[in-house]
Amino acid sequence: GAGVSQSPSNKVTEKGKDVELRCDPISGHTALYWYRQSLGQGLEFLIYFQGNSAPDKSGLPSDRFSAERTGGSVSTLTIQRTQQEDSAVYLCASSLVGLANDEQYFGPGTRLTVT
Amino acid sequence: AQSVTQLGSHVSVSEGALVLLRCNYSSSVPPYLFWYVQYPNQGLQLLLKYTSAATLVKGINGFEAEFKKSETSFHLTKPSAHMSDAAEYFCAVSADFGNEKLTFGTGTRLTIIP
């Protein structure tokens, strides 16, 4: 079946612009996660959704970062006023109900480059 | 806070040799430990998951990991390396039951020497 998909696969933007990254989870998966993978920082957790609610936003690095999920499905990660340090690969994952009974299935990522 | 340490950012082994990738967790026994593999330009794929049901966990592609509480370790092994095993490997931990956040190690890049 279809896995987690993310779009765009690559995004180049100028410093100060806003960007939106999209994640389509596996159908029926209630849990959705965003991570960031950057050189020197490794993989960092950003936010977790259960349905449309985000019980854990602890990893969002600043108030320039926000995320929403609608219809218990698609999620969008928005970065406002992008900075060069935002350059990274943004990974989305989904899980049927959560770690207790399932694993996190990762998408291929969106590579963001801020110039 | 829970964390994981992966010793060796780069490991090279000969084809057919034992693969050993090291992972140590930081504090109290975590509910879940994971090993993920990332092939070039691909997302992460789960190799195996520890859930306390068994200390020796078998995963895909011939990999296994042993949970050792006394050593706070969860090292990944494979008896005989194959060229297709060349990838980056990540150890990850969840802090508590009900905590969905995964904390990842910095990764180990495995190179297979023909």
Image: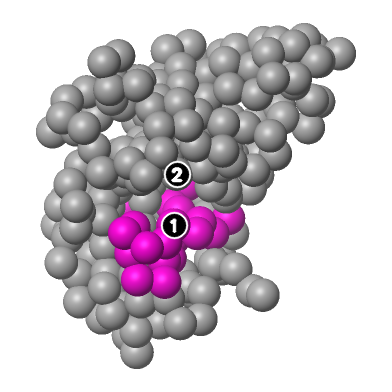
Is residue A51 placed above or below B108 in the rendered structure?
A: below
Q: Which residue is mark 2?
A: B49
B48 part of magenta stretch = no
Q: Are marks 1 and 2 in contact (CB under 8 Å)?
A: yes
Image location of residue A60, percent across then percent down: 21, 52
Quadrant containing the C terminus of chain B in the rendered view: top right
The stretch drawn in magenta includes residue A105: yes
Specify the label residue A28 is tagged with. Answer: none
Seen from the viewer's position, the closer of residues A84 and B87 is B87
Residue in the picture at 20% in, 76% down: A53
Q: Residue at x 48, y 73 (%)?
A: A25
Q: CA distance from mark 1 to mark 2?
A: 8 Å
Residue A84 can be seen in this image: no
Q: Are marks 1 and 2 on the same chain?
A: no
Would you place residue B71 above or below residue A43 in this image? above
Residue pointed to by mark 1: A103
The residue segment tinted magenta is A80-108
Q: Nearer the viewer, residue A63 or A53?
A: A53
Within-10-Å neighbours for mark 2: few <14, some 14–19, many 20+: many
Q: Position of residue B95 (x, y in %)?
A: 20, 42
| Residue type, numbered disc 2 | Lys
